[in-house]
Amino acid sequence: MFGLVSLRSLRAAAAAPGSSLLRASAAGASRSVSSSAPRRVGDADLLSDVDRADAFAADAYAEMPGASSGSRGVGSSQYRKRQLKADAAAHQLHVQASRNNTIITLARPHDAREHPGGTIMSTSGGTAGFKKSARSGYEAGYRAATTMFAALEAAERKLGDIKLDVVWKGFGQGRDAVFRALTSSEGEYVRARVVGMRDATNIKIGGVRPKKRRML
């Protein structure tokens, strides 16, 4: 009974507002909290962190190619529109290399005032002097390419300083021949005016059963 009464009195003394025991325990608790618990993050700290993150993002963006101060960089859609506009202003040099012939055609730009995309001139293995099955050979394609290159150089005064977009179609022997002629010294004039190349070969996926091949 004595122990129970003394325990109650001790608790009452500790709970009193002016108790030295309460002040000592509170001081110890504050010291323990300040030493072990993390510091509470305030609004000022959060704002400073956001400002530092924004400054880092701005510095990283300034180092990106195409970014300028006060303006956004060129997006993919804007770049694509500008690329399409550049392609529309260039003459089209179509190289059709089939199993039977190699045909090279120079066409007007798509944004031309008169006859957009129309044919200006054309050469082939047949116009280069080859007959029948010889028109599909490597030499026929090479000769057709050099003939077109010479005609383009001769028409420089009429056509002016043009830009060329080379469009490849087909997988005949003349395809490699035209490419070799373009990379040679005979194609130096045309090679300097090429601004783009693309492949427009139709690739069949599925569809009906193909015709039986002829036995040679």
Image (cartoon, helix red, strand yellow):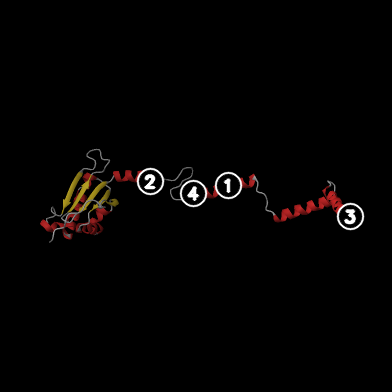
Residue 2's label in the rendered image is: 3
- Kind of residue indicated by mark 1: Val
Residue 50's label in the rendered image is: 1
User: Which of the two discs, 4 and 3, labels the residue nearer the N terminus?
Assistant: 3
Question: How far apart are the alpha carbons under marks 1 and 2?
Answer: 32 Å
- Kind of residue indicated by mark 2: Tyr
Residue highlighted by disc 4: 61
- Kind of residue indicated by mark 3: Phe
User: Which of the two discs, 1 and 2, labels the residue nearer the N terminus?
Assistant: 1
Marks 3 and 1: CB-CB under 8 Å? Answer: no
Tell me if 35 is positioned left or right of 48 in this view: right
Between disc 1 and disc 2, the foreground one is 1
Residue highlighted by disc 2: 79
Marks 4 and 2: CB-CB under 8 Å? Answer: no
Q: Residue at x 25, y 56 (%)?
A: 188
Spot the residue most to the top: 113
Residue 70's label in the rendered image is: none
Q: Residue at x 56, y 49 (%)?
A: 53
User: Which of the two discs, 1 and 4, labels the residue nearer the N terminus?
Assistant: 1
User: Which of the two discs, 2 and 3, labels the residue nearer the N terminus?
Assistant: 3
Across and down, in percent, residue 182 comes to 24, 56
- Kind of residue indicated by mark 4: Tyr
Element type at marker 4?
A: helix
